[in-house]
Amino acid sequence: MKVLGILGAHKQHGVTAKLLATTLAAVPDSTETETIYLEDYDIHPDIKGQSNPVLDELTEKLLASDVWVFAAPTFWGGLSGVTKNFLDCLRWRLVRIDHVGDAHPDRFNNKHYLSITDCYISPINNFFTGITDETFKQIDRVMSAAGVIKIHEIVCPNTFKNGDHIPESKLQLCRKWGARLPQKSKRDDNTMKRYVELFCMIAVMSLITMGIQRALSGVLTQTNFWINWGTFVVIFFVLLAIILHTVTFLIHRRR
């Protein structure tokens, strides 16, 4: 078992690096860890007919690791340039491209990854504007195409105000997930879990919908099947829209 830390920041000993180091330090001693600092490498895309020893070396490190920990700051509401360049240049190695240009998982399929980012803005501002969302989405988009399985994500906002000081709560979060990294199995199958979650959500929403119909019994005709069915559908999907909006725009906001 091996965990590879990938530091995509301009500072080798800045806040992002400290978050990554804290995470890797919590990995049990029985698991090997390694950190690569992307600024140390002259990374450029593969050119047909030419060797690319830098990408060859980085590819071997990725292949030799079971879990990757991406640590990159958020700049201008997106992934840091050095990390983006790293992922861009690896595109032909991360996935298999078919005859119509679609990407498919290849040799990195079923590996795991953890994402870490930090940003200047306050936690409340980040919660409502989602500045760090795009950083995670960019990493997730590439990893999903490569078949790499997401473990978790960690964000540390307010670095402009705090400087190099990292709140203890964020360090504890890094230690918590660092200790869990070796526990990830080679292959995940959450199909049954998703079915159970979906069933429970539908059951609860149906119960709430029936309760609302009962409360509106004074204005609804309870003996007309089609009116009851129509109001049930309308109430149910209004609730569904509210829940999806909440999950997408509120619960997943990173602070």
Image: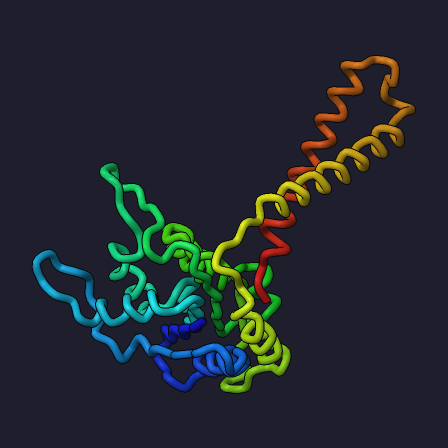
Viewer-nearest residue: 9 or 200? 200
- x and y, in percent, of residue 229 in the image: 76, 20
Is 14 rendered above or below residue 228?
Answer: below
Q: On the rendered image, what quadrant is the N terminus found in?
A: bottom left
Q: Is residue 220 left or right of residue 169?
A: right
Q: Residue at x 25, y 61 (%)?
A: 89
Tell me how many marks there are. Answer: 0
Closer to the camera, 156 or 33? 33
- Would residue 231 be seen by someone viewing this image from the given angle? yes
The residue sitting at 43% across, 81% down in the picture is 17
Residue 73 visible to an observer of this rendering: no
* In the depicted structure, whether residue 223 falls above or below residue 35: above
Measured as percent of width and height from the top left, residue 226 is found at 76, 14
> What x and y, as percent, mark residue 162?
55, 83
Q: Please identify the quarter of the rendering in which residue 75 is found.
A: bottom left
Q: Residue furthest right?
A: 218
Q: Quadrant of residue 99?
A: top left
Q: As drawn, is 236 to the left or to the right of 214?
A: left
Please state if 116 lies on the left or on the right of 7 as rendered: right
Q: Tell me where residue 149 appears, x and y as whole percent.
A: 47, 57
Residue at image position (35%, 69%) is: 64
The C terminus - image quarter = bottom right
The residue depicted at 81 percent of the width and 35 percent of the height is 207
